[in-house]
Structure formats: structure tokens, C-alpha cells
Image (cartoon, rainbow, N blue to C red):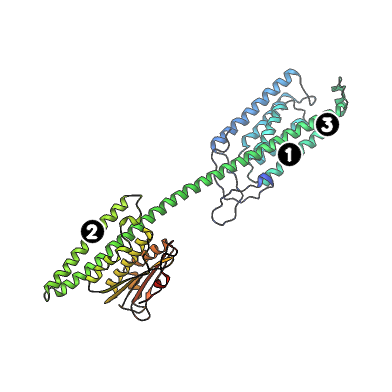
């Protein structure tokens, strides 16, 4: 009979008993202390099976009564009347109906009935012994209070041995005649006592241990189901986290690609509007810059979307890196900014992801300068240090604490967040803020595994 078909977790706290009965479920959520597991009650189908078992054992008891009387086999002495024999046989089977729903009560009642039936010399002992075995086993397998279950089982076993001793003492005089052919070295009474004790020890010990084993199996099944649920939840969380990270990556790429070029286009369009009537040639130049920025933005978007369609593509597949910083600055120059671009140290190959991250930091810093700084000059420096590559962008625009939030965060906050995410992804560091002498600075450092690839003295040079 499968008794672990449906296992539910109950949060009731019950006192645990020693040994196997004190097991607790593993994997308690969070840092909460582990609570003793309480086996849930039987299902409706299991209750129906118990009803069938109880009625079947009662019916078998009636059959045993008929057979015992037919054979004239009355091992306990003169039996009571037929109705009383039938009543004891039925009474010994019916408590099994509640063996899983109320195992403590079922076992205690059955033990009392068993002893009372023997006191009345009921000839039916075989089925009654089987029902007692099932009751003790069921209490071990289904007892929700493990300490109480252990105490009741031990009490029942002790009571059975006490009754066995009393019954043996009362029938000593009649036992001698039951061994007419005894010829062994041990007294017949001693041999019978040893046999009876050994049989009953094995009988009750087996029922006790099997009950504990079944309860432990149900606990293990529960733990497996809890672990399976945790694994399923972990998979769902990982999948959701992966989707979120991919959405953040797409948002970051779109922001970096669109914001920069749109900002340059806005500045050029504004300049074109202001000089349209006074200097048509400058207006045409500005509009040409707007056109070029629009084409570049469209090209970058197409390339980025192509990479996103390729699930195995890396960020570096976009084709942008520190080598393209100079071409990136051309839009700022066209916007009227005085741009100075300097490389310190000996350029060394860096990972594509680091190169792209550095490029995006410069791009975002330039976007903020064009949109918010009202600067006239920008200084971009790339330093190849011994174990790091440093990207720095400074301008001479507005300063002061009031201007810092608008310039560093932007209208939506995605710019600074994107830079921090890119730098943090490579275990780098980011500094953003106003300079003491005026203007604004963005400085990012990325660790690289190129020891000794740069000239340390050149790397620390300053303008």
C-alpha cells in the first residue's frame, strides 16, 4: 500500500522524539529555524481503504471464531458464549478503521480490547494479533506527535508483556501437562517462556521499526518534493532574471546609440535655425551634420538589432571600441565644441567587451556635455596603465551642486545607470562629479590582464 501519495507541508510545531522520530525537513526557507515536520492526515482514498481494512479484519475474526469452535481449539480455556465471541472478534477489527486518521486512539483502544478478550478466554487470537501488529505499525507511521506516538507504543508493548507474565503465572499448573514428551536439557516451562518472549519481542520490534521506517520514508518524500519545488522556483527566478538582464542590456544599448546622435542632431538643428537667415552656408553645414548623425544612428541601430537577433553574439560584436573614440568625437566638433583627444601610454589589445564599455562611457559623457553642460571645450583622455585602462572626459561647462544631478543623471537617469552597470560588469570603478576648478569630470577605470604592457611613467602623465 502506497502511503506517501500526497504529502503536504504543515507548519504546526510538534515536539519531536529521539532517534528517527526527531527528523526535521531540510531546506527551511530563509534563516528561520527548522520546524519538526508533521505528517498530514490521510487522504479520502486512504480513509476508504482503512474502512475496508477494518471491516475485512472483523470479517476474518468471525471466520476465525467459527473455525476455532469447529475444531474445538480453545487455547485460553473455556470460551464465552457465541455472541460474546462474535463481539470480541468484531471489536478487535473495527479500530483499524481509524488507524491513520486517529492512530493514537486506535492503538490504545485495540490494546485494551485485545487484553480484555484474552481475559474472557476468547478463542480468536490469530486475527487479533494481526490487528495489534497493524495498529502499532500505523501509530509509528502516522503519529503526528512523535513523542506521544513513541510513548503509546512503548506503553502498549509493556502492557502486553505484563499481561503475558500474568497469564503465564496463572496457567503454570496446567502447563506441565502440555509437554508429555519433553526430553530436552531445559525445563519445558523455561523453554516455553523463552520461546514466547523471543516471539513477542520480534513481533513488537518489527511493528515498531516498520512504523518508524514508513514515517521516515514519508519525510524523505516530502523533502524531495520541497527541493523539487525550490528547484522549479529557482529556475523560474533565473529565467525571469535573465529576461530582465536582457531587457536592461537592450535598453542600455538603445539609450547609448540614440541619445548621443539625437543630442548632436538637436544641437546642429538649433544652430542651423539660428544662422539660417544670417549665414546660409553655416546652416547647410549644420544640416549636413544632422543628416550624417541621423544616418549613423540608423546604421548603429541596424547593427545592434542584428546582434540582438543573434543569441550567441557578444556586445563586442557591435564593432565599436576605444579605437573608434576619435570618430565619435567628430559629432561634438561639428556641434561647435573644442575637443581635445589624447592617448597616454602604449595602446595594448583589450577585451572587446572592455573596449566597447569604454567607448560607451565616452559616448554617454559626450551626450551629457552636449545636452546639459553648455560647455565650449571637452578634453578626452585614454590612459593605458600597467593593469588598467582609464577613460576620462572633462569639460568646462556649468558647475555647482545644483547642476550635478541634471548633468550626471539626465532626464531619465538611464545615462549614469548605464555607465555604472557597464563599469561594474568589468569590476571597474567610476567617478562622476564637478571639478574643483570648474567643469565636470567622468572617469572610468577598467582592469585588464596585460601586466607590463604599458609604460607606467607615461601612464601617469597629466596635461
Which residue is the site of mark 2? 298
Mark 2 or 3 closer to N-term? Answer: 3
Split into 4 quadrants, where in the image is the N terminus?
top right
Residue closest to the eye, 18 or 276: 276
- Quadrant of the rendered structure where residue 69 is? top right
Element under label 1?
A: helix
Identify the residue shown where x is 35% and y is 56%: 315
Which residue is the site of mark 1? 156
Q: Is residue 249 left or right of residue 212?
A: left
Which residue is the site of mark 3? 168
Give the distance between the C-alpha atoms of the residues marked 1 and 2, in whole angstroms.
86 Å
Residue closest to the eye, 99 or 323: 323
In the rendered view, would you say 216 is above or below 296? above
Give the distance between the C-alpha atoms of the residues marked 1 and 3, in whole angstroms.
18 Å
Q: Nearer the viewer, mark 1 or mark 2?
A: 2
Identify the residue shown where x is 58% and y is 49%: 26
Q: Residues within 10 Å of mark 3 (few under 14, many from 20)?
A: some
- Quadrant of the rendered structure where residue 134 is? top right
Q: Nearer the viewer, mark 2 or mark 3?
A: 2
Element under label 2?
A: helix
Mark 1 or 2 closer to N-term? Answer: 1
- Residue 284 location, x and y as percent? 14, 69
Mark 1 or 3 closer to N-term? Answer: 1
Amino acid at each position: 500500500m502506497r502511503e506517501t501519495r500526497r504529502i503536504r507541508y504543515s507548519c504546526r510545531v510538534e515536539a519531536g522524539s529521539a532517534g528517527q522520530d526527531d527528523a526535521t525537513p531540510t531546506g527551511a526557507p530563509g534563516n528561520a529555524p527548522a520546524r519538526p515536520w508533521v505528517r498530514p492526515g490521510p487522504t479520502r482514498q486512504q480513509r476508504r481503504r482503512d474502512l475496508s481494512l477494518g471491516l475485512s479484519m472483523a470479517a476474518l475474526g468471525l471466520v476465525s471464531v467459527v473455525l476455532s469452535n469447529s475444531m474445538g481449539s480453545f487455547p485460553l480455556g473455556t470460551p464465552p458464549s457465541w455472541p460474546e465471541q462474535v463481539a470480541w472478534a468484531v471489536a478487535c477489527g473495527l479500530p483499524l478503521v481509524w488507524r491513520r486518521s486517529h492512530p493514537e486512539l486506535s492503538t490504545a483502544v485495540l490494546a485494551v480490547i485485545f487484553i480484555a478478550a484474552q481475559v474472557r478466554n476468547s478463542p480468536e487470537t490469530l486475527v487479533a494479533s494481526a490487528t495489534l501488529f497493524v495498529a502499532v505499525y500505523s501509530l509509528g507511521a502516522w503519529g503526528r506527535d512523535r513523542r506521544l506516538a513513541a510513548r503509546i507504543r512503548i506503553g502498549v508493548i509493556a502492557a502486553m508483556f505484563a499481561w503475558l507474565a500474568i497469564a503465564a503465572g496463572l496457567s503454570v499448573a496446567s502447563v506441565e501437562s502440555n509437554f508429555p514428551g519433553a526430553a530436552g536439557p531445559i525445563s519445558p516451562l523455561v523453554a516455553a517462556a523463552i520461546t514466547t518472549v523471543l516471539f513477542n519481542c520480534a513481533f513488537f520490534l518489527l511493528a515498531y521499526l516498520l512504523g518508524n521506517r514508513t514515517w521516515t520514508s514519508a519525510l524523505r518524500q516530502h523533502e524531495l518534493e520541497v527541493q523539487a519545488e525550490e528547484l522549479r522556483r529557482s529556475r523560474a527566478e533565473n529565467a525571469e532574471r535573465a529576461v530582465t538582464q536582457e531587457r536592461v542590456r537592450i535598453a542600455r544599448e538603445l539609450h547609448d546609440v540614440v541619445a548621443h546622435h539625437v543630442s548632436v542632431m538637436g544641437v546642429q538643428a538649433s544652430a542651423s535655425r539660428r544662422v539660417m537667415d544670417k549665414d546660409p552656408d553655416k546652416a547647410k553645414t549644420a544640416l549636413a551634420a544632422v543628416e550624417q548623425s541621423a544616418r549613423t544612428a540608423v546604421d548603429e541601430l541596424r547593427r545592434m538589432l542584428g546582434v540582438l537577433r543573434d543569441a550567441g553574439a557578444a556586445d563586442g560584436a557591435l564593432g565599436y571600441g576605444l579605437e573608434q573614440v576619435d570618430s565619435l568625437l567628430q559629432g561634438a566638433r561639428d556641434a561647435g565644441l573644442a575637443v581635445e583627444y589624447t592617448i597616454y601610454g602604449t595602446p595594448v589589445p583589450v577585451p572587446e567587451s572592455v573596449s566597447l564599455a569604454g567607448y560607451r562611457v565616452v559616448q554617454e559623457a559626450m551626450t551629457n556635455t552636449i545636452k546639459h553642460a553648455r560647455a565650449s571645450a571637452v578634453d578626452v583622455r585614454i590612459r593605458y596603465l600597467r593593469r588598467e585602462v582609464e577613460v576620462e572626459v572633462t569639460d568646462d561647462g556649468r558647475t555647482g551642486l545644483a547642476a550635478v544631478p541634471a548633468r550626471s543623471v539626465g532626464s531619465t537617469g538611464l545615462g549614469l545607470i548605464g555607465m555604472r552597470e557597464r563599469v561594474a560588469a568589468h569590476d571597474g570603478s567610476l567617478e562622476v562629479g564637478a571639478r574643483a576648478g570648474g567643469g565636470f569630470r567622468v572617469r572610468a577605470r577598467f582592469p585588464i590582464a596585460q601586466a607590463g604592457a604599458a609604460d607606467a611613467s607615461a601612464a601617469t602623465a597629466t596635461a
